Image (cartoon, helix red, strand yellow):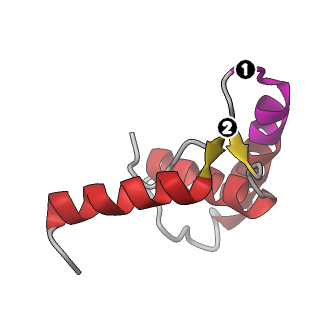
């Protein structure tokens, strides 16, 4: 759906509220088609971001796994290497 939304579950340390909100913002932007909503649509847009972030937090808290937590730095390095492979060096 959106390449900017990354997995937030099963990381050590766990996802921050800012990361959850950023993912919710990307989701709402994608489904609404707005990068920046008009003043008339801003309340609905912000309410949707808040509600999705809230529900995402509940989801992340409720999920269980036996897998060991992933290391954020290792995953970030893999993403960066993939981007270099895909788009070339910066």
Q: Position of residue 25 (x, y in %)?
A: 61, 57
Q: Which residue is mark 2?
A: 9
Residue 45 sits above or below residue 2 on the image: below
Q: Which residue is mark 1?
A: 65
Of the 4 image quadrants, the one containing the N terminus is top left
Do the residues bearing badges 1 and 2 touch, measured as CB atoms within 8 Å? yes
42 lies left or right of 35: right
Magenta region's main secondary structure?
Answer: helix
Res 61 quadrant in image: top right
Q: Position of residue 4 (x, y in %)?
A: 44, 55
* Of labels 1 and 2, the one closer to you: 1
- Camera-side residue of 46 and 67: 67
Which of the labelled discs sits on residue 16, or is there none?
none
Q: Which residues are magenta?
A: 55-66
- Camera-side residue of 6 and 52: 6
Residue for point 14% across, 70% down:
88
Secondary structure beneath dot 1 equals loop
36 lies left or right of 57: left
Query: Tag 1: Cα neighbours inside 10 Å, few (<14), some, or many (≥20)?
Result: few
């Amino acid at each position: 759906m959106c390449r900017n939304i990354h997995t937030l579950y099963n990381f050590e340390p766990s996802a921050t509220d800012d990361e959850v909100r950023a993912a919710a913002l990307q989701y709402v932007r994608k489904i609404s088609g707005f990068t920046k909503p008009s003043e008339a649509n801003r309340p609905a847009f912000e309410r949707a971001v808040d509600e999705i972030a809230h529900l995402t937090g509940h989801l992340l808290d409720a999920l269980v796994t036996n897998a060991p937590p992933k290391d954020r730095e290792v995953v970030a390095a893999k993403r960066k290497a993939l981007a270099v492979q895909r788009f070339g060096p910066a």
